[in-house]
Image: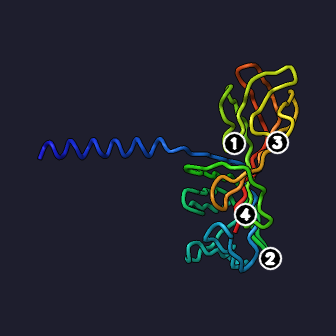
Amino acid sequence: MKRLIILSLIFLLLTSCAEEQKPVLSYAGPAYVTIKKNERLPFAEISYLGRSPQGAEVLIKGQKTLKQRGDSLDWKGALFPGVELELKSRIINFDARALRSFGIFTIRITEPSPAPALPPKEAFAKFTAIVVYRTGKGEGIPGTTLKYRGRDPEGAKFEGLEGYPYRKTGDSLVYTGKLKEKVYLVLNVRVLYYSENVVTLGGTAEIIFSY
């Protein structure tokens, strides 16, 4: 019996370690949310029913509640397998037509499979995060198929770029790709610093969710 318990504990530890080692991409940034009257957020079970004398009438997970200006409007859930969205916001105003809130979003993508791709023509949600990456020589830029190949007389050299592979300090670098099924990335950054061994990039990452 004792041996069985020990083996079970070892199995649980190994399983836990394996789960922790799964690659995860995380993006965070400001979120301005507008919910029109009698409409639902496309990425959350939150609907705005309209204004009443007591405040804003909101439906969350099928349950009706009253909200005032400054109240929280939060959501956490899975959009797709391996894609989790967390929204933490506060209501800034509401009227007969819509409710508006402002806060912070966090998107976590487990086991992404980056591949070059054009962004979809139609999307039900877009979020823009601020990103800064410090990437070593031979390492990949998170969420992309690009790699930093070191310093060259013509500038910082990147593997995976179409055409001219060099960028100097202050130059832009744009990449569009697919992270998972129905999840796309538009990375728009500039070279902040580069040397033979490392490059620092800063800019925005737009996460796009298609139908």
Q: Earlier in the sequence, mark 3 or mark 2?
A: 2
Quadrant location, the C terminus: bottom right
**Helix, strand or loop for disc 3:** loop
**Marks 4 and 1 in Cβ contact (< 8 Å):** no
**Picture quarter containing residue 78?**
bottom right
Callout in the foreground (4, 1)? 1
Does residue 119 lie above or below 35 as drawn? above
Query: In the drawing, what numbered circle is on residue 162?
Result: 3
Of the numbered discs 3 and 4, the one sitting upstream in the chain is 4
| Residue drawn at 59 percent across, 51 percent down | 109
Camera-near label (1 vs 2) is: 1
The residues tagged by marks 1 and 2 sit, at their Cα atoms, a distance apart of: 44 Å
Bin the neighbour count of mark 4 within 10 Å (Cα to Cα): few under 14, some 14-19, many 20 and up. Answer: few
Q: Secondary structure at mark 1?
A: loop
In whole angstroms, how far apart are the C-alphas of marks 1 and 3? 11 Å
Disc 2 secondary structure class: loop
Q: Which residue is mark 4?
A: 125
- Taking depth in this image into account, of 66 and 133 the one nearest to the observer is 133
Q: Residue at x 24, y 46 (%)?
A: 8
Let me know if residue 55 appears in the view. no
Q: Residue at x 54, y 43 (%)?
A: 23
Could you tell which of marks 1 and 2 lies nearer the N-terminus? 2
- Amino acid at circle 2: Arg
CB-based contact (under 8 Å), mark 1 and mark 2? no
Q: Check disc 3 and give the amino acid type.
A: Glu
Q: Which mark is residue 97?
A: 2
Residue 76: % across, % down: 57, 60
Q: Nearer the viewer, mark 2 or mark 4?
A: 4
Corner quadrant of residue 165: top right
**Dot 4 or dot 1, earlier in sequence:** 4
| Labels 1 and 3: the sequence-earlier one | 1
Calculate the distance from the C-alpha at mark 2 to the C-alpha at mark 4. Answer: 20 Å
